[in-house]
Image: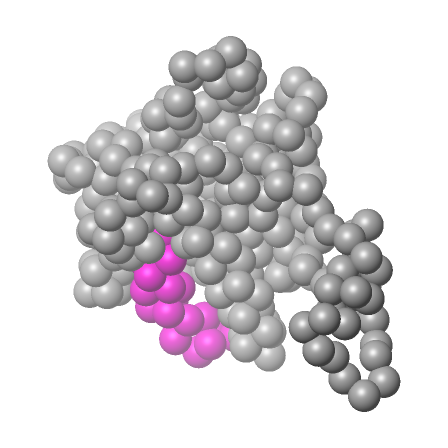
């Protein structure tokens, strides 16, 4: 499905990223494997991590080049696209997958951890996307896939910085889709459920935590790759500005934010009439405070 295409994948040395790189190559793509090679908390970079995935692709007869740049640095992000063009002559798709976790309860979250998460998960995705946009616009084609999270769409405890970044990714993807539709460029999001080094950092102290971890352990990172590869292929030419979720052998489509109720008061509102009239009218439509496991409460299938 990707014959002749050049696909850049960030965070492609391990886990979900590695599986996507391997599948993209097996489907005929020439792949730029980007990975800073950091630990699950974003520290201790290892430039050799990306090279291992490249070696695996080439051993299987595919074509790939390694890039160990930090996507949180604009010049590093630009180098990913530059490497694609230098090695293979073009760029057809970008999969923004790189990231790490530093979960903290909000009242314990410090600015450094907030800034680091935002800089990779949101700024970094922008830097890579923007670097590719000029090429996409010139050639009149291209596809983006950005990884988001149910932490942004539903909520999870201790992930305020991660959730904020991943919510921003959805907004950015929608705007890219709107701005670049005229150039035949698409932008979609995937929210993955999969056991990975990042998932392994989840708390497992309570019985509820242990059940959640057990569910994650049953979900292979390889299950995410088929949808991602499809979305950067020409078969997805009419799929744009969507948010998908993959959970083992299940694929979900998330609804966009839209109004669910309205109320009008002739002459306007006061705080008192908001309490008296708006509140009881809207209360039945208020959503509950939930975490992802409350919504996805059944075992993965």
Q: Is residue 143 visible?
A: no
Picture quadrant of residue 19: top left
Please tell me which residue is depicted at 46% across the width and 76% down the height of the picture.
137
Is residue 11 depicted above or below 294 in this figure?
below
Side (left or right) of 17 relative to 216? left
Please tell me which residue is depicted at 46% across the width and 36% down the height of the picture.
157
- In depth, the one of 101 and 82 nearer the eye is 101
Side (left or right) of 123 relative to 188? left
Please tell me which residue is depicted at 54% across the width and 16% down the height of the picture.
208
Whole-percent x and y of residue 126? 37, 64
Whole-percent x and y of residue 20? 45, 37
Q: Is residue 137 visible?
A: yes
Q: Residue furthest front?
A: 272
Whole-percent x and y of residue 282? 79, 58
Q: Residue furthest bottom?
A: 267
Please tell me which residue is depicted at 21% across the width and 60% down the height of the picture.
73
Magenta span: helix, strand or loop, mainly? helix
- In depth, the one of 153 and 129 nearer the eye is 153
Q: Coloring scheme of the render?
A: one colour
Picture quadrant of residue 270: bottom right
- Magenta stretch: give its range: 120-140
Picture quadrant of residue 6: bottom left
Side (left or right) of 98 relative to 83? right
Is residue 178 depicted above or below 87 in this figure?
below
Q: Work out which quarter of the rendered image holds the N terminus and state it.
A: top right
Q: Is residue 123 magenta?
A: yes
Is residue 16 depicted above or below 144 in this figure?
above
Whole-percent x and y of residue 291? 57, 35
């Amino acid at each position: 499905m990707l014959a002749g295409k050049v696909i850049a994948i960030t965070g492609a040395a391990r886990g979900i990223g590695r599986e996507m790189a391997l599948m993209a190559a097996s489907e005929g793509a020439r792949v730029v494997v980007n990975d800073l090679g950091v630990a699950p908390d974003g520290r201790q970079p290892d430039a050799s991590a990306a090279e291992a995935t490249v070696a695996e692709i080439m051993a299987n007869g595919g074509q790939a080049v390694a890039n160990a740049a930090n996507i949180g640095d604009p010049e590093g992000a630009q180098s990913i696209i530059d490497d694609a063009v230098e090695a293979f002559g073009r760029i057809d798709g970008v999969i923004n997958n790189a990231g790490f976790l530093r979960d903290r309860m909000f009242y314990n979250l410090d600015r450094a951890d907030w800034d680091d998460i935002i800089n990779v998960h949101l700024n970094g995705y922008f830097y890579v996307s923007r670097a590719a946009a000029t090429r996409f616009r010139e050639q009149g084609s291209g596809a983006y896939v950005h990884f988001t999270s149910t932490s942004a769409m539903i909520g999870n405890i201790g992930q305020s910085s991660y959730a904020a970044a991943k919510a921003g990714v959805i907004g950015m993807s929608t705007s890219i889709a709107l701005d670049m539709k005229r150039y035949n460029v698409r932008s979609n999001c995937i929210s993955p459920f999969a056991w990975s080094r990042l998932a392994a950092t989840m708390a497992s102290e309570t019985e509820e935590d242990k059940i959640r971890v057990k569910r994650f352990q049953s979900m292979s990172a390889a299950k995410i790759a088929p949808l991602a590869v499809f979305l950067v292929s020409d078969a997805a030419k009419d799929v744009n500005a969507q948010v998908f979720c993959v959970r083992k052998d299940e694929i979900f489509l998330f609804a966009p934010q839209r109004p669910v109720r309205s109320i009008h008061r002739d002459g306007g509102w006061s705080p008192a009439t908001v309490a008296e009239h708006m509140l009881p009218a809207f209360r039945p439509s208020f959503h509950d405070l939930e975490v992802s496991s409350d919504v996805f409460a059944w075992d993965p299938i």
